[in-house]
Amino acid sequence: MDLLTAPLPGLYLGLLAFLLDRALRRWWDPVPARIWGAFALVLAILFGSSLFLGTVLLSVDIVPGVRTVEKLKLRSVGNSLQLDIPTQILPTMAQVRRQVKSGAWPMWNDLAGAGMPLLGDPQSQSLQPLVLATLPRREFRAGLYEVIKYGMTTSRLLFDRVAGERKAIFARAPEALTAIIAESCRIKASVVADDEREAGPRRILNFGHTAAHAIEAVTKYRRFRHGEAVGYGMLVAAELARARGALADRDRQALADLVASLGPLPPINDLSATQMLEAMQHDKKVVAGKLHFVLPTAIGAATIVDDVTEKELRAALRQVGFAK
């Protein structure tokens, strides 16, 4: 949501309030109808203004041409309205999409992952690394798995930076955060610019997400943060690539070690490979009956395949730790 589109929810509510006011004036006594209409309109204006001002006040341009996206939420607390401003490491639209899909705005699910065509392409981008200091460690760590994804598929330098600067990153040192976020944003912007509608090459951004989406679906989006599920998903994809001979075991182990070094992941030993395979069949990456899978071929390189068999997947899932 950018500075131009942030007020849209408020405008929609304002239009709805106007239409309801017209109807109520026709069928009800005009005095209470006017009072109700005025109240609804004021609420709509406040909602839109809060979104707009919250976006403006938190926007700090650091990397030209790249924007992170915040989902702002207005809720009632006692006798007042509270504006919640969640923060994430936000080169990761996937995290927004999962929140949208399982949260309050299900109708935005498909738009969020496709550049939000209804709202138009933003003219500028911004991000706010300083507010990452407010995140609990688990939430912060969840974002880092997505950064590892960019390193594993595209940039050995980014992968090594996360591995070598973990102490500074977890200390939320601005220079360390700016470096990894900027590189993640650069990678995603480059990939999306070449394939805006995910017709082919952009699928590389789905590395780790095939198994991740299945994990989230099987656990009903309650046990895992999205990044944690991606952590497991990357391990599954790497094991699959290793078993095929596409990835050296030392690179698979380097990925496993880096994922483990960030901290403990929720358990998966009660989730069966059968459940996971069933959930994967409903993933958006199934095209013409074939599941497209992103497999790493080295640290900083990956390929997209569509011939992964159920036997291969089941073996990889079991190797990572899923039940039979």
Image: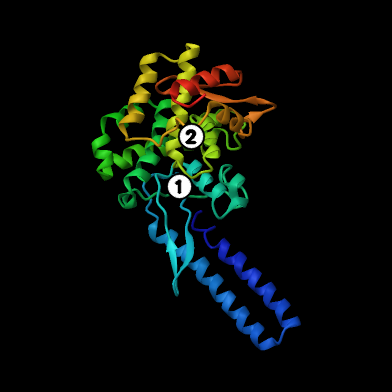
> Closer to the camera, 208 or 1?
208
Q: Could you say where residue 52 lies in the image, as x and y percent from the top left? A: 48, 63
Q: Is residue 282 visible?
A: yes
Q: Is residue 135 above or below residue 238?
A: below
Element type where label 2 sits in the image: helix
Is residue 172 found left or right of 302 in the rendered image? left
Residue at x 55%, y 48% (from the top left corner) = 102
Three-letter code for the amino acid on which mark 1 is drawn: Arg
Asked which quadrant contains residue 251, the reply is top left
Residue carrying label 1: 67
Element type where label 1 sits in the image: loop
Asked which quadrant contains residue 238, the reply is top left
Q: Could you say where residue 218 lies in the image, as x and y percent from the top left? A: 54, 37
Three-letter code for the amino acid on which mark 2 is drawn: Ser
Residue carrying label 2: 190
Measure how far apart labels 2 and 1 are at the Cα level.
Answer: 13 Å
> Closer to the camera, 42 or 102?
102
Dot 1: within a 10 Å radius of its alpha carbon, few (fewer than 14), some, or many (20 or more) residues? many
Is residue 162 found left or right of 100 in the rendered image? left
Residue at x 54%, y 43% (from the top left corner) = 220
> Closer to the camera, 308 or 287?
308
Q: Answer yes or no: do the residues labelled 2 and 1 have beta carbons within 8 Å?
A: no
Q: Could you say where residue 286 lies in the image, as x and y percent from the top left? A: 64, 29
Asked which quadrant contains residue 54, the reply is bottom left
Q: Could you say where residue 40 lies in the image, as x and y percent from the top left? A: 59, 75
Is residue 186 found left or right of 118 in the rendered image? left
Q: Is residue 323 above or below residue 72?
A: above
Q: Is residue 308 visible?
A: no
Residue at x 55%, y 30% (from the top left corner) = 276
Q: Is residue 128 above or below residue 296?
A: below
